[in-house]
């Protein structure tokens, strides 16, 4: 191993949006900044987010915006007070990327791409003097507190005045954030909640016939009904997709926290789908009670309920033949189709992760109590939020907070 190089300044580990924002903020305060990234280039997950149009943030006003962070509302709201959705849009404009408010108040770059934004940002950071070290995988800290990296040239140690870790969560590990940092931080006495899938699909276990014919079929619009831990019922309208093993899509992602928690608690989660939200229940019953005149069930459903394809197939999955012959039960099932969700899809497939460094392990400036001078930011922290731009917004905001606090500490401590 090469000897630790004594350099003043900040080390940022992880080149996602949180780490890049920490680097930018600290550099703007006049610090020397070295950014280390395990992969051969930075921002790979950010680029993949661009494939879906790059939903950068959301136009929902406060306090509704902050409520999206659930039990972490208060903590994330504090980060967002310093750098919220409008600041993020202004920041993007500073890189020559204008944004617009799209459907459901989601905010996107005009070209809906991540690559131009990332390219411009990295160029600006390099021009400002941030030093990039790719293919540097952080392994942990040595006995003297220096950062240990695996590099193509062997292991290297780096001593920094302060460090921001922005190592991401555990979803889509092929893009770099694989959660391998968890044991390294736990070994230092940092309290880390296990990484779990968030914004994920769920397994149901369809018949082979349904899976073969309807995997990938969209279900829209539908209304999902579910009960919280206290038995209170909630409803949310949106869109989802039948998969080979179950169900996924934005509506299901939005419910992934209560569904995942119900499975952990009860071994399964129940969900009821209104497959025909535009149709009033009594009217639907009357329409379906009309004489079939020899028409097949499929044709009857199509004519009198506007239901066909995957929605009709779901009915057949849920109801036995005697129930399918009873039009009142068919009508009731169309308005409230019961689904039993058995397990979340694996973390690797999820859009994001829950769990991570518990916020109680950090002070308000996001510095670890167990490791003074080491800050954490982004998805590696234990908060979660639905898709819709809320994820990236909190990553940027926490990166900025950590970068600023690290700079203040370095100035204070010399
Ligand atoms: C398919 C997909 C689409 C998404 N779309 C959106 C969207 O439209 N809007 C939205 O708000 N969110 C979206 N997200 C979520 C969003 O991309 C993430 O929440 C965000 O990128 C997390 O930022 P981060 O900086 O915390 O971590 P990451 O972006 O995961 O970056 C962490 C970085 O740290 C590096 N790293 C990890 N371990 C080490 C190590 N040991 N040593 C050195 N470097 C390491 C990784 O290689 C990576 O570059 C999407 C996610 C996915 C998977």
Image: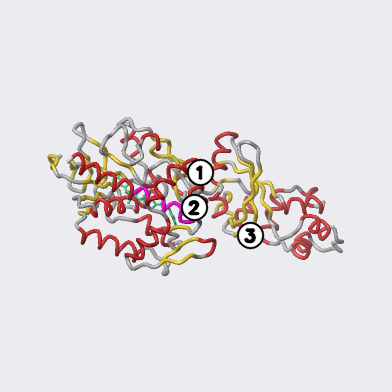
Where in the figure is residue 323, as x and y percent of width and height? 79, 48
The tag on residue 62 is 2
The residue singled out by tag 1 in the image is 70
Most common SS among magenta residues: helix
Residue for point 55% across, 38% down: 261
Earlier in the chain: of badge 3 and badge 2, it is 2
Which element is circle 1 on?
A: helix
User: Which is more toward the observer, 178 or 265?
Assistant: 265
- Horizontal side of 99 relative to 408 (left or right) equals right
Residues drawn in magenta: 388-399
Where in the figure is residue 385, as x and y percent of width and height? 48, 48
Figure quadrant of the C terminus: top left
The residue singled out by tag 3 in the image is 221
Which element is circle 3 on?
A: strand
Where in the figure is residue 104, as x and y percent of width and height? 54, 61
Q: Is mark 3 within 8 Å of ligand 1?
A: no
Where in the figure is residue 329, as x and y percent of width and height? 79, 50
Earlier in the chain: of badge 3 and badge 1, it is 1
- Horizontal side of 252 relative to 115 (left or right) equals right
**Magenta span includes 392:** yes
Figure quadrant of the N terminus: top left
Badge 1 crowding class, 10 Å Cα cut-off, few under 14, some 14 to 19, many 20 or more, is some
User: Which is more toward the observer, 409 or 285?
Assistant: 409
How far is disc 3 from disc 2 in space, using C-alphas? 27 Å
User: Which is more toward the observer, 227 or 85?
Assistant: 85
Give the colouring mode of the picture. secondary structure
Residue for point 38% across, 58% down: 87
Residue for point 54% across, 46% down: 256
Earlier in the chain: of badge 2 and badge 1, it is 2
- Horizontal side of 392 relative to 277 (left or right) equals left
């Amino acid at each position: 191993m090469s000897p630790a190089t004594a350099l003043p300044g900040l080390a940022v580990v992880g080149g996602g949006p949180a780490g890049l924002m920490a680097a930018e903020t600290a550099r703007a305060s006049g610090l020397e900044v070295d950014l280390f990234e395990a992969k051969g280039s930075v921002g790979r997950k950010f680029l993949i987010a661009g494939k879906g149009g790059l939903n950068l943030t959301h136009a929902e006003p406060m306090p509704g915006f902050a409520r999206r962070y659930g039990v972490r509302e208060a903590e994330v709201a504090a980060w967002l007070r310093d750098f919220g959705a409008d600041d993020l849009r202004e920041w993007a404009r500073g890189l020559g990327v204008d944004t617009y408010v799209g459907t459901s108040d989601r905010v996107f770059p005009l070209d809906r791409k991540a690559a131009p934004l990332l390219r411009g940002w990295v160029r600006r950071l390099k021009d400002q003097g941030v030093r990039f070290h790719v293919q540097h995988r952080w392994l942990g800290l040595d006995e003297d507190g220096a950062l240990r990296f695996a590099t193509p040239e062997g292991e290297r140690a780096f001593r920094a005045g302060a460090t921001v870790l922005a190592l991401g969560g555990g979803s889509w590990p092929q893009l770099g954030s694989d959660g391998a940092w968890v044991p390294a931080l736990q070994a230092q006495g940092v309290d880390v909640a296990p990484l779990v899938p968030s914004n994920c699909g769920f397994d149901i276990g369809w018949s082979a016939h349904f899976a073969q014919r309807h995997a990938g079929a969209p279900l829209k619009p539908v209304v999902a009904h579910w009960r919280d831990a206290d038995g209170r019922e909630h409803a949310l309208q949106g869109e989802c997709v039948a998969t080979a093993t179950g169900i996924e899509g934005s509506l299901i992602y939005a419910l992934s926290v209560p569904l995942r928690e119900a499975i952990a608690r009860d071994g399964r989660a129940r969900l009821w789908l209104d497959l025909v939200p535009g149709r009033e229940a009594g009217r639907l019953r009357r329409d379906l009670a009309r004489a079939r005149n020899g028409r097949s069930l499929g044709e009857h459903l199509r004519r009198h309920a506007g239901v066909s394809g995957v929605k009709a197939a779901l009915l057949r999955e849920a109801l036995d033949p005697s129930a399918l012959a009873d039009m009142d039960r068919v009508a009731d099932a169309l308005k409230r189709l019961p689904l039993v969700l058995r397990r979340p899809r694996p973390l690797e497939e999820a859009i994001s992760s829950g769990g991570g460094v518990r916020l109680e392990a950090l002070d308000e400036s996001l510095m670890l109590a167990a490791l003074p001078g080491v800050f954490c930011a982004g998805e590696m922290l234990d908060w979660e939020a639905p898709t819709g731009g809320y994820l990236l917004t909190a990553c940027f905001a926490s990166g900025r907070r950590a970068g600023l606090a690290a700079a203040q500490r370095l100035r204070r401590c010399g």
